Image (tube, helix red, strand yellow):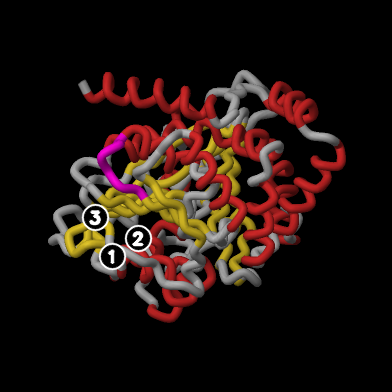
């Protein structure tokens, strides 16, 4: 029954996205050909310039970017890139609205998903807020065109203004963590995935990413037993751990196990989330997990990795996932030829090690932002790993 409901939601959501002019693409070539048909060279140059300025992290440039992309010609072209995102998030949020009567969609943008929720639940009241005036103007216009009387859109910048009203459900998807490139908080050492509780580091993370003030403002208008749906780019443990601590310290507890989500950005795969369903003021029934999630690293089996790969240039074993640490720890008779541990300018501690184990050569890399890699080759190809080692030590790898 749940799968049938999810399929029905997706069908109506696809129809809604088509109404907005969004198109689904499975190849970059197809998308960019359509992009060139829709936008002039001048408009494309303006869009690219706005993207570059937005990457600088200045909030004024970010607002200017979303104001620019709210234009009728730009909007469907840009947001079609996020077609699968809308499908994954829109369907999940819809299935978790439940008994909520007053719903706030924080960071609603032009209102693509907000208007979908309002169409799907006509007896519930929705408010969408965003700090881009042009985006809010578009959202208001589209709601009027759809004849929606149960949704309101307000231009609010929570960094400077308070939110009004109270809500029993708040939805915040890709709206809380604005510093997408922030690496998070480093683990205790390169040998561990443990992130110590450091009040100063946590406060600095909340300030850099902007989530401190945003969560405080949202929490202030959430009913005592209200729920919150949160989905941000916090998949990496160094970001996930402090992000979850920010939620927990404000009395937001897990209702369900967080769900990592994978979706397509045309040809690019996005490993995103997790998707959190939280409740304010409830007793913690589910524990927060600060361990690496199950990964896709190849199991370590010495008898298997000694077999030559079908590609003679490929290593016998190459694991870039957290499980590479466990594989490295399992290497027998490990003899270190060269190693280096240093502190990087961005605060991470990095370790790289070249050695041998039972007649094979290995290279192991680890840092305190949770990156791990173990490469194993035949000892006759040690020179390949030596080159890689020098590149990493010199900073060019």
* Magenta-tinted stretch: 121-126
Q: CA distance from mark 3 to mark 1?
A: 18 Å
Mark 2 residue crowding within 10 angstroms, few (<14) / some (14–19) / many (20+): some
Magenta stretch holds residue 150: no
Front disc: 2 or 3: 3
Report the side of 126 relative to 373 (left or right): left
Label count reads 3
Q: Which residue is mark 1?
A: 248
Whichever of callouts 2 and 3 sits on the residue coming sooner in the sequence is 3
Q: Which residue is mark 3?
A: 168
Q: Can the viewer see residue 5 in this picture?
A: yes
Quadrant in which the N terminus is drawn:
top left
| Magenta stretch, main secondary structure class | loop
Q: CA distance from mark 2 to mark 1?
A: 6 Å
Q: Can the viewer see residue 329 in this picture?
A: no
Whichever of callouts 3 and 1 sits on the residue coming sooner in the sequence is 3
Q: Which residue is mark 2?
A: 244
Query: Considering the numbered disc 3 on the image, is that residue within a helix, a strand or a loop?
Result: strand
Mark 3 residue crowding within 10 angstroms, few (<14) / some (14–19) / many (20+): many
Could you tell me residue 3's position as x and y percent? 27, 22
Report the side of 334 relative to 392 (left or right): left
The correct choice, above or below, for 85 with respect to 153 in the image is: above
Query: Considering the numbered disc 2 on the image, is that residue within a helix, a strand or a loop?
Result: helix
Magenta stretch holds residue 123: yes
Report the side of 340 relative to 284 (left or right): right
- Rendered residue at 54%/43% (across/down): 141
């Amino acid at each position: 029954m749940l799968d049938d409901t999810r399929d029905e939601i997706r069908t109506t959501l696809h129809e809604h996205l088509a109404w907005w002019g969004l198109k689904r693409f499975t190849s970059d070539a197809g998308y960019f050909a359509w992009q060139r048909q829709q936008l002039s060279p001048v408009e494309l140059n303006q869009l690219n310039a706005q993207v570059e300025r937005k990457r600088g992290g200045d909030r004024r440039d970010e607002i200017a970017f979303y104001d620019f992309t709210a234009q009728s010609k730009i909007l469907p072209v840009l947001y079609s890139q996020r077609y699968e995102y809308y499908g994954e998030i829109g369907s999940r949020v819809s299935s978790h609205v439940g008994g909520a009567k007053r719903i706030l969609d924080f960071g609603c943008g032009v209102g693509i998903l907000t208007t979908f929720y309002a169409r799907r639940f006509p007896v519930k009241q929705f408010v969408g807020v965003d700090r881009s005036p042009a985006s809010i103007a578009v959202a208001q216009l589209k709601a009027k065109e759809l004849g929606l009387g149960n949704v309101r859109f307000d231009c609010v910048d929570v960094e400077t203004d308070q939110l009004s009203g109270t809500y029993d459900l708040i939805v915040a998807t890709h709206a809380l963590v604005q510093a997408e490139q922030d690496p998070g908080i480093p683990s205790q050492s390169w040998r561990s995935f443990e992130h110590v509780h450091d009040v100063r580091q946590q406060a600095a993370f909340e300030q850099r990413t902007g989530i401190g003030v945003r969560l405080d403002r949202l929490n202030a208008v959430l009913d005592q037993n209200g729920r919150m749906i949160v989905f941000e780019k916090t998949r990496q443990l160094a970001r996930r751990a402090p992000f979850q601590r920010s939620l927990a310290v404000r009395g937001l507890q897990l209702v369900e196990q967080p769900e990592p989500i994978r979706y397509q950005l045309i040809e690019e795969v996005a490993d995103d989330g997790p998707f959190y369903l939280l409740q304010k003021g409830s007793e913690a029934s589910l524990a927060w997990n600060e361990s690496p999630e199950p990964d896709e690293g190849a199991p370590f089996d010495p008898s298997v990795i000694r077999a030559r790969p079908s590609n003679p240039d490929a290593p016998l074993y190459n694991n870039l996932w957290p499980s590479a640490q466990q594989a490295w720890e399992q290497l027998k008779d490990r003899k270190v030829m060269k190693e280096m541990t240093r502190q990087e300018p961005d605060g991470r501690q990095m370790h790289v090690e070249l050695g041998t184990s039972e007649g094979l050569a290995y290279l192991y890399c680890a840092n305190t932002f949770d990156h791990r890699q173990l490469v194993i080759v035949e000892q006759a190809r040690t020179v390949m790993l030596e080159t890689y080692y020098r590149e990493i030590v010199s900073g060019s790898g």
